[in-house]
Amino acid sequence: MSIPSFALIVTAAGSSLRFSSTYENSESVKKEFLQLDGHSVLYRATEPFFEIPSLQAVVVTYKDDSLDETIVALEDLADINTIPMFFVKGGKSRQESVKNALDKLKEINIPFEYVAIQDGARPYVTPRLIINVLATAFNSSGAVPALPVTDSIRRIDKTGSIIECPSRSGLVRVQTPQFFEFDKLIAAYENQDINKATDDSEIYVKAGFNCCVCEGDEANIKITYERDIPDARKQIESYIEDRRKGRASREANETFRRLLNQVEDEL
C-alpha cells in the first residue's frame, strides 16, 4: 500500500512573546529564524516532511512584515526540492492562520488526501514520527502524537489557590504534527468557532470527526524559551541589531522568489 498523499501547513505567524520577553525589542525576535546546527529553527521543523515521498505541497504562514525573513529561513529547501511551497500571511490567532493556509490549499490545483499541521518552532520532529502520525490518521481519519502526563495536575483560581485536583488518568500532552483528512478539516473549520480552540484536533473532534493519538516523542519539544536554543542570547542580540540596521539577505531572497515563481508557473 502506498503512503497517503498529504499537504503540509507550517505555522510561523506567532509573536514569540514568551521566548523574547526579556528583550526591549521583543516583538522583532522570531524564534523560528534563529539557528540550530547551521539551519533555521523553521527549516529544521519543515525539512523532515520532505523525506516523506507523498508530500504534495507546503504552505507556510508568516507574521506581518516577516515574509522576506520567512523565505530566507527556508531558502535551502528550494535548492534540493521541487515540491510547491506557498507563503500566506497569518491571522490574529493561530487558528486564523491555519484557516488562511487551508484557504490557500483549496485554491491550488494539487490533489492530496490529508493535511498535516506543524508548529514552525518544533525543530526536532523526525520522519519516523511523521509516518507514525500519518499511518494513525489513515486508520482513524485524524491523529495527533501525544505523551502521558507524568506530573500531578492542579486547577487554580486567580489568586493562585488550588481549587481542584484532577486525576492524570486519561490525560495526555499533545504535540504536532497533527494529521487530518483534508475535506473533513475544511468542514470542521467552516462550522466551528475556531478561536475558542487551543489546537486543530479540538476543532476536528468538536465537529464530530474521529481523531486518535499515537505515541509522541519526548525530544519533539516546541521551542518556547531562550534556554531551548544553544547560544540563543548571542543570536538574538545579533538578530535585533540586523533588524535595527535594516539588513536582509536580499540575494538569497531574490533567488528563492525566482525559484518559487518557476514552480508556480508550472502549476
Image (cartoon, grey):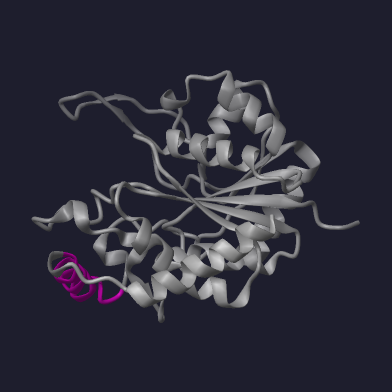
From the viewer's perspective, is residue 213 above or below residue 31? Answer: above
Front in this rendered view, residue 48 or 69: 69
Give yes or no for residue 165 being in the magenta stretch: no
Residue 23 lies, in percent from the top left, at 12, 58
Q: Which residues are magenta?
A: 230-243
Can residue 82 be seen in the rendering of this structure?
A: yes
Image coords of residue 110 (percent x, y): 72, 48
Q: Where residue 184 sits: x, y (%)?
A: 69, 30
- Identify the residue shown where x is 66% and y is 50%: 7
Left or right placement of residue 19 versus residue 144 in this view: left
Q: Residue furthest front?
A: 265
Q: Nearer the viewer, residue 90 or 237?
A: 90
Residue 170 in view of the camera: no
Left or right, residue 47 beside residue 165: right
Vertically, is 263 above or below 211?
below
Which residue shows up at 38% across the image and 36% down it? 91
212 to the left or right of 91: right
> Is 239 displayed left or right of 77 in the figure?
left
